[in-house]
Amino acid sequence: MSEKDKPSSKLVWVVLSGVVSLVVGVSSSLMIDQINDNTAILIFNVTSLESFPGEAQKLGIIALHVENKGGKEVEEVKCRIEMRNAKLKEPRISGLSAASPKIHFDESYFEISIPFLNPKEEFSLQLLVEPDGDALEVPIIDIRGKGVVGTEVRNTAPSRSVGFLEILVPILMTIVAALSTAFLSIRRLFVGSGDGGLGVEQRDGFAFLLGLNGFTEEARELRQSNRQYSWWTLSDALAERLLHADPLDLDGIKRGMDVLNALVSHQHQMTNASKAIVHTNLARLAEASGDTLSATQHIQFAFKVDKKTTHLRNGAIPVLKKLTKGHAVEQSAGLQLREPK
């Protein structure tokens, strides 16, 4: 072969290698899909493990997601959850369609038996518990069906061949993420940053709090809603409903503050801007109930965690303007304040 022909020869080998890789990648994916279509794959994942500090008692939520990932029906599905350092108060199941489950539980365990789980069918469990200690431990979980044992899903995935689409999709997602970041940055200038859309388990966790504090209608509406919420959206909705009640319900305001105080304690799940907004709503509720001291403490803490977002809210709400007393609260935002309860 002459020197002149070498570049074109290399190009041919590159093209052939690409074609072979594409064929192998597609064939492997089709084979895996075919295997999955003929196999029952039972997986589960602990989606939420949260505790809520309360005045009378501590509460926690353990959320579990179960799915038949394969293409074959799983019969005689049984899920047993044994508490480690908590007492079970109330279970809730969502997502089951046709199957009629059998449920057994007491303070130490929860067990559900399902006659069958269809291919791709999934369901969720939310357990309201009373933790024995400060940190809620992951319970002992055993899930199995006829001929299959449940496997816990991890965030990591096994390595496999990368195809052209798997390279293209991340590039497109990067572009979309950059545009979304720019949009959210502009949006934060006007309404403050949020936490994005909450998952089903987080939304149901807030609905639990509402129901426990007597807001049964609000809890029902939240569970039936299909829209996505942020923490500050839920906070605004509850505060506005209480503040516009006629006549003003002081007991309802106190219960609403208990809900928001429990919500705002999740510092690891909320952005500073959302946390500041929740505190501004707590300040509004406290002021409406006549507790000016608590209202001032909440608005002070709001300025401390996110001054910009609090300033935007403060400028739009007359009650908050009154509490700040000519920027005195804003200036105190640099002090070492403790989070009000």
Image (cartoon, grey):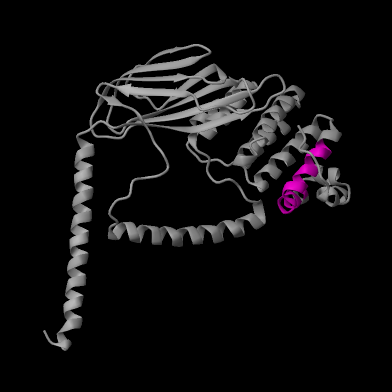
Q: Quadrant of residue 125?
A: top left
Principal secondary structure, stretch drawn in magenta: helix
Which segment did they paint magenta?
Answer: 295-314
Q: Where does the image place residue 251, in percent across and percent down from the top left?
A: 74, 22
Q: Is residue 64 left or right of residue 301?
A: left
Closer-to-camera residue (152/237) = 152
Q: Where does the image place residue 188, in percent across and percent down from the top left?
A: 63, 55
In this orientation, does residue 7 appear?
Answer: yes
**Numbered-mark total:** 0
Q: Is residue 144 left or right of residue 7?
A: right
Q: Quadrant of the N terminus?
A: bottom left
Q: Which residue is rendered at x = 61% and y = 56% of the image?
A: 187
Q: Which residue is rendered at x = 62% and y = 42% of the image?
A: 270
Residue 94 painted magenta? no
Q: Which residue is rendered at x = 29% and y = 22% of the image?
A: 145
Residue 299 painted magenta? yes
Instruction: Work out whether 313 lies above or below 213.
Output: below
Q: Quadrant of the C terminus?
A: top right
Q: Is residue 17 left or right of residue 293?
A: left
Q: Which residue is rendered at x = 77% and y = 47% of the image?
A: 304
Q: Where does the image place residue 208, in percent across and percent down from the top left?
A: 57, 25
